[in-house]
Image (tube, rainbow, N blue to C red):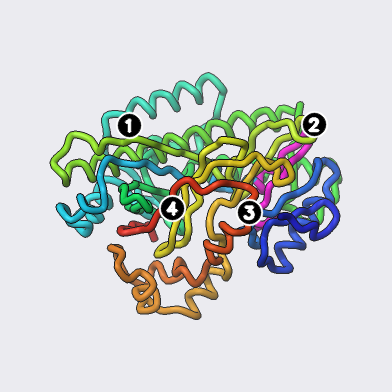
Amino acid sequence: MPTELTSGVLSWASHIDDRTIEQATALAGLPFIHPHVALMPDAHAGKGSAVGTVIPTKAAVIPAAVGVDIGCGMIAAKTRYTEADLERISLTELRDEVERAIPLSPGNYNKKIHHEHTQERIDDLEALAEREGVDLAHSPKWREQLGSLGGGNHFIELCIDTDGSVWCFLHSGSRGVGNKIAQKHIKIAQALCKQWHIQLEDRDHAYLVEGTPEFTQYLKELSWAQTFAKFNRDEMMDRFLNQLARLFGDDHAGETERVNCHHNYTEIMTISGEKVWLTRKGAIDATEGRMGCIPGSMGTRSYIVRGKGNPSALFSAPHGAGRAMSRTEAKKRFTAEDLDASMAGIVYRPGDAWIDEIPAAYKDIDQVMEDAADLVDVVHELRQVMNVKGT
């Protein structure tokens, strides 16, 4: 159940820091917020506004609140394989083949078309950009970025649910092209607010006003980046499934279910009788019946969920475990040996590069899911057996 932290802020987080509360309170004080700001169970301080914040705005959008990884999200696919089947293949070999099929880490892009649907997705994105007048001059290599993972907390995992079914699971977004789109429009919003002499508590609260050319162009380019992010996850999932099937000597992995959801994006909704632009910064759509993915940190459990449509939570749910400490702090506290102990029984590529992703640097996913009990129902609980990350 929610707690009213301050006027205009409802929170589902049982553990929350003062900075996150301060950021949410500042957002709630903006004149176009309606009806309130919602903090998800995984909420933690971020740039301008906390990650895990749901922000409903009337006739305005805050580009920095959407963030620079537009459309970042999760995708999961259930296969016909079972835990017993995995004894027939090497998960280390699967890890290596996935790393070859999907470019990892920032700046690493495709050198060639990898999959039968790659060009089709590029063609669809080109047509959408031309139709909507999306300016992509800042990202001449956006086509090569489609089907690449990135770094940070982006990951690829093989998982097993409680019934023994094998799932492919991954986390990524709109890559460099989405970042360029976001940065461009954040600067435009800041310049306009300065021009209009609007006093803001945080310059990352700068907003675009509905009905202006700048707002219209941002929404077009935002929508394109969200589509790119969805296609990017679909592309990588197809490659992942192909590599899994190939190791089994099959033509396909017998996919039976796929869930693809954003957690950094904006969409138009009706909330409390008013049309608003609902920005989910680190939150998923949890309208009634909507399927979603909530990952734990590497080495812990993840979940496939179904939304309950809680109106007080603005029809939203958490997007993951949420950081309990900064990356810098995690690197000070932990070692590669600590990470290796946390990943016992899971095939991954050990090393210093992933210390800041150690499970201890994140909130307890069990507590997050307990806090989210009135937001979603758990449909599948997954445990990891293989993990791939970009640095």
As measured in the structure, the alpha-carbon distance from the residue carrying label 1 to the one carrying label 4 is 31 Å
Query: How many numbered tags mark residues here?
Result: 4
Task: Kindly identify the amino acid type of the residue bearing the numbered disc 4.
Answer: Glu
* Residue 83 seen in this snapshot: yes
Q: Earlier in the sequence, mark 1 or mark 4?
A: 1
Write down the region rendered in magenta: 46-65
Task: Kindly identify the amino acid type of the residue bearing the numbered disc 1.
Answer: Thr
Question: What residue does disc 3 label?
Answer: 52
Which mark is in front, 1 or 4?
4
Residue 206: percent from left, percent from top: 75, 46
Q: Give the left or right position of residue 367, taking residue 301 as reference.
A: right
Task: Kindly identify the amino acid type of the residue bearing the numbered disc 2.
Answer: Glu
In the image, residue 301 above or below residue 269: below
* Numbered label attached to residue 322: none
As measured in the structure, the alpha-carbon distance from the residue carrying label 4 to the one carrying label 3 is 21 Å
Q: Earlier in the sequence, mark 3 or mark 2?
A: 3
Question: What residue does disc 2 label?
Answer: 274
Question: What residue appears at the point 34 percent right and 53 percent down from the top-left corner?
Answer: 160
* Residue 48 seen in this snapshot: no
